[in-house]
Amino acid sequence: MFRFANPEYLFLLILVPVLFVYHWWRGKRLTGKVKYSTLRYMKNLPVSLRQRVRKYFFVFRLAIITLVIFALARPQSGTRKQEITTEGIDIVLALDVSSSMLAEDFKPKNRIEAAKAVAEEFINGRTNDRIGLVIFAGEAFTQCPLTLDYGVLIQLLDKVQVAPREWDGTAIGNGIATAVARLKDSKAKSKVIILL
């Protein structure tokens, strides 16, 4: 992150174009005409180094003034630390992934697709609450621990599929027990388990 500690000094930059216009106007005003009988000899006169760089002196001065103004404004860069105050609620979603969730009670969606849609809508509606995800069938697993990163949580939710045949079943007790275990060490004021 880039910022200025004293941005009020940046208003002095308006002096740069003002000085440029004044210098141009003054130079035009002071320019005089000298009459020569011929310019043939003038063209052969050597040009000193001072004369060559003289026209750049003012540009250098303007550049120095600009740099001094930026220095006074104190440009700074770095990371910004941001504190997030949560509402003190930890939530675990316990999602049934047994084969019974393939039933098409919510056509054109089956139960698991409908449950995932409801869960995603719920997650998107929360702010600063830690949310975790537990899935269960014949056994229970933690799909995502409590987190404030709702983007990662939704990605893991989208990957949820119906359990394979070898661990099919509806062990609601195991699902609730796993959700309780996720909340056991939580220091939140409120702890919630939502069964889907």
Image (cartoon, helix red, strand yellow):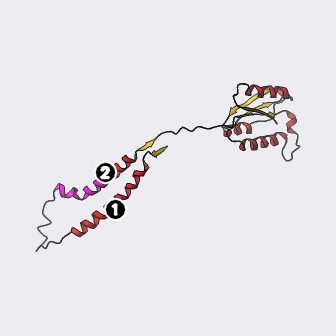
Q: Give whichever of 32, 19 is nearer the camera.
A: 19
Q: Nearer the viewer, mark 2 or mark 1?
A: 1
Magenta segment: does it hold 54? yes
User: How far across and down, in percent of the image, does residue 86 sit?
Assistant: 66, 37
Residue 129 lies in the magenta stretch? no
Badge 2 crowding class, 10 Å Cα cut-off, few under 14, some 14 to 19, many 20 or more, is few
Residue 54 pos. (x, y %): 22, 57
Q: Quadrant of the C terminus?
A: top right
Q: Judge from the rendering whether residue 137 lies leftward or rightward of residue 142; answer left or right.
A: right
**Vertical comparison of 42 with 81: above or below:** below
Q: Nearer the viewer, residue 192 or 87?
A: 87
The residues colored magenta run: 39-61
Q: Which amino acid type is marked by label 2? A: Ile
Location of residue 47 in the rendering, given as x and y in whole percent from the top left corner: 16, 59
Report the residue at 20% width, 57% height from top: 52
Residue 18: numbered disc: 1
Q: Secondary structure at mark 2?
A: helix
Residue under numbered circle 2: 64
Instruction: Determine whether, in the image, residue 46 is placed left or right of residue 158.
Output: left
**Regarding mark 1 in the picture, which secondary structure is present there?**
helix
